[in-house]
Amino acid sequence: MRSTRLATNAGGVLPALCVPLCVSLLSAASSPLFAQAKAQTSPAAKATPVESAMDKLAAHPTVAAAFKSLKSDNAWTLDQQASICQIPAPPFKEQARAAEYAKRFRELGVQNVRIDKEGNVIGEIRGVRPGPTLLLAGHLDTVFPEGTDVRVKRKGTKLTAPGIGDDCRGLAVVLTVARQVITQKIPFSGKLIVVGNVGEEGPGNLRGTRAIFAGPMRDSINMFISVDGTGFGVTNGGVGSNRYRVHYKGPGGHSYGAFGMPNPMHAMGRAIAKIADLEATTTPKVTFNVGIVSGGTSVNSIPFEAIMEVDLRSETAAALAEIDARLQKALRQAVVEEKARWPKSTAALSVVIDTIGLRPAGSTPDSAFIVRASLAAARTMNVYAPLTISSTDANVPMNLKIPAVTLDGGGVGRGAHSLDESYDDRDDGYKGPQWVLLVVMGLLGAK
Ligand SMILES: [Zn+2]
């Protein structure tokens, strides 16, 4: 899911690649970096070349027909969203939903539909001329365990069920966009790869997207968009995280009889004190947290094991690596100090560090073409799309410096990751898929 909403900083990198549309857009691009963002708040401002091109693209007969159909056949999109949501997809158990999603891709005429070793559903829609490859994904997994009641309750325009917004909305948007691209025969360049990926949520640790970018497809993907969540945000900053379960271990013994040996719980206390005193910067933001502690057998026993779970996060890979190095040092120094406290003891004391989560940090600069195109398309749609920082599937390509964003899927979502999660389509939910379609076709140089 997406979460944090923050303004991002300007970068200074030019668009990484130029597709036919992009070439014409960039030839006259001389306006300030944030012109498109300003234009969203001041309607009278003159359109930038990217914005003008998006306006023009929206008026292209095939795109206009797609827009019309997305609106008039909005019920189809909502039916996809609800029916996919009723197939349980707990972490690491996305198989049934994946099989159904693959079936729907095939029925739409998506080519070369397959399920890779990791469990990702992957299909292709080829353009009418050579060009770049854009991967458009929604995530199959939810945070909910097996046995959760995932039946969808409908009341007017509101759907309520666990996972209905995060990310059944994204899955439905990818399907409905693919359907329009195929049925309207939009003449774009290159290749659109459509994906339902596994493992986005916490325990999945981005395993689906990671597998895609670790495999043979990696070098052919020029741009990445994940549709995740509701509303109209553009996530171009990816918060990275490193998570560990740390065990301090020793022989343990009677608290009175065996007194005088290193105590794993005391060692862990020393480590926690060091973590609490770590210095963290605000730019880039760096955070640390000991979230869970456990261990011990009784109040009158020296524990044989003490366990804690630690979470580190940052917006930049360098800052995350830096705080991680200091954490590792603190965890080991705690063992040295606890042993030094009892120099006459020969009892062992050790620390074992298990990695339970690694999400790479990364970002796509505000000035990148994929970001500017996303904002320009929002302006064309007459919706306000803020730039945000979050932790999503886009973290993986961002970390590899592949232009990537996560786009919201429209509508209004509430209570993501809770059992009473809801999605309200209101009267303009269709604008979500319209926006995503316009961005994707703009980036693939439809003309
Ligand atoms: Zn999500």
Image: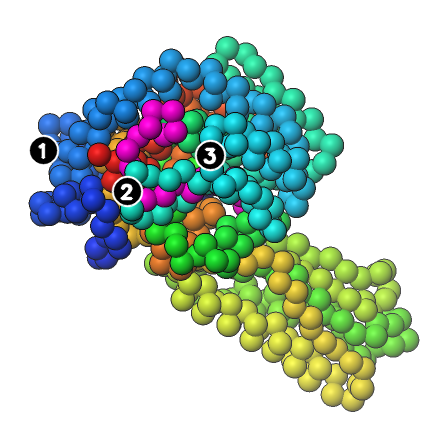
Query: For this view, does 417 lie left or right of residue 436?
Result: right
Q: For this rendering, which residue is in front, 360 or 446?
A: 446
The image shows residue 330 at horizontal and vertical percentages of: 57, 73
Estimate the spatial distance between the alpha carbons at disc 2 and disc 3, rounded to whole Å: 17 Å
Residue 193 in the magenta stretch? The answer is yes
The image shows residue 212 at horizontal and vertical percentages of: 50, 53
* Residue marked by disc 1: 46
Amino acid type at image mark 1? Lys
As drawn, 165 above or below 159: below
Mark 1 neighbour density, 10 Å: few (under 14) some (14–19) many (20 or more): few
Query: For this view, does 106 lie left or right of residue 297?
Result: left
Does ligand 1 reach within 8 Å of label 3's beta carbon? Answer: no
The mark nearer the N terminus, 3 or 1, is 1
- Element assignment for label 1: loop
Query: For this view, does 96 lie left or right of residue 102?
Result: right
Q: Which residues are magenta?
A: 181-202
Would you say residue 193 is visible in this rendering? yes
User: Residue visible at 51% across and 68% down?
Assistant: 324
User: Residue visible at 21% across and 38% down?
Assistant: 37
* Residue marked by disc 2: 129
**Front tag of 1 and 2:** 2
* Residue marked by disc 3: 110
Quarter of the image where one finds residue 182:
top left
Quadrant assignment for the C terminus: top left
Residue 356 in the magenta stretch? The answer is no
The mark nearer the N terminus, 2 or 3, is 3
Amino acid type at image mark 3? Val
As drawn, 95 above or below 184: below
